[in-house]
Amino acid sequence: MNTEKTVSIYQNLDAAKFELNQLEITLTEAKAVKNYLIEKDVLCTPEAIKAACSRNFDSVIEHFIQSEKAKLTAFEKQFGVIALLTGNTEERLKESADKLRADLMAGMPKISYLSMYYFDMIDFDTLEISPEYNKKYFEQKNSIQVAPEAAKHQKNLVDALNYFATVSDLDLNVLFRRLVNVKGFEREYSANLEFFDFNKEIRNFVENKIQEVNRYGNR
């Protein structure tokens, strides 16, 4: 929803705080992955770091294979063909690549399950949080936004209902049957957020994410 043309009628500030904290955790984990690749002396481009955060080492392995092939080519140019002396170089290279992949997987730093939702908010060139993902962004993300005209009419309706509920001595059912021919109104009125947030995705954000972690844990 285009928040420039909407207004907030509810904000889940706990959810915004939760997401900001998780984003900081994700950044810390991304930096740990970069240091891990450096320690392993393998490809450490921004793209390789981001992929490794999802346990994808394809670009690292491909770079390793091409580097090893280049070394063999340079060696053969200087000393002649060595395949007959050393066996199948392609097979040996594949074995080395498979071993490297297994080694990288085994020592990979732990990544929070929830971080998968936040890696795209990291600038992997600078290894900083992209500036647009700030407190305001998460407060808007975790809010119920409606069109200004709808919010105005809803407020007018709630105010009117509360006004008539307080100024009339008539039985409410009788009063509102006279006014709008609707039964069952209560004495106090407020906006029904379920109308805008039927599945409680905004209101129960933190609880839902905690349940996800309990189900899937860390990787």
Image: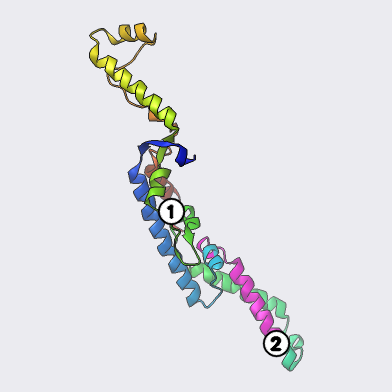
Q: In this view, does 194 lie above or below 182?
A: below
Query: In terms of depth relative to the viewer, which is nearer, 138 or 208?
Result: 138
Q: Is residue 186 left or right of residue 202?
A: left
Q: Which of marks 2 and 1 is in front?
A: 1
* Label at residue 165: none
Left or right of residue 88: residue 33: left
The reply to whether residue 195 is in sight is no
> How many numbered discs sit on the rendered protein?
2
* In this view, 158 is above or below 126: above
Mark 2: which amino acid?
Ala
Specify start and end residues of the magenta stretch as a single range.
Answer: 52-73
Determine the main secondary structure of the stretch shown in magenta: helix
Above/below status of 185 relative to 25:
above
Badge 1 local density, few (<14 within 10 Å), some, or many (20+)?
some
Q: Determine which residue is flagged by label 2.
A: 74
Image quadrant of residue 198?
top left
Does the CB distance between marks 2 and 1 fall below 8 Å? Answer: no
Residue 158 percent location from the top left of the image: 34, 22
Residue beneath the point at 75% across and 85% down? 83
Instruction: Answer whether residue 69 is magenta in the image.
Output: yes
Residue 126 versus residue 194: which sits nearer the camera? 126
- The Cα–Cα distance between marks 2 and 1, rounded to whole angstroms, is 47 Å
Horizontal side of 214 relative to 59 (left or right) equals left
- Asked if residue 152 can be seen in this view, the reply is yes
Residue located beneath label 1 in the image: 133
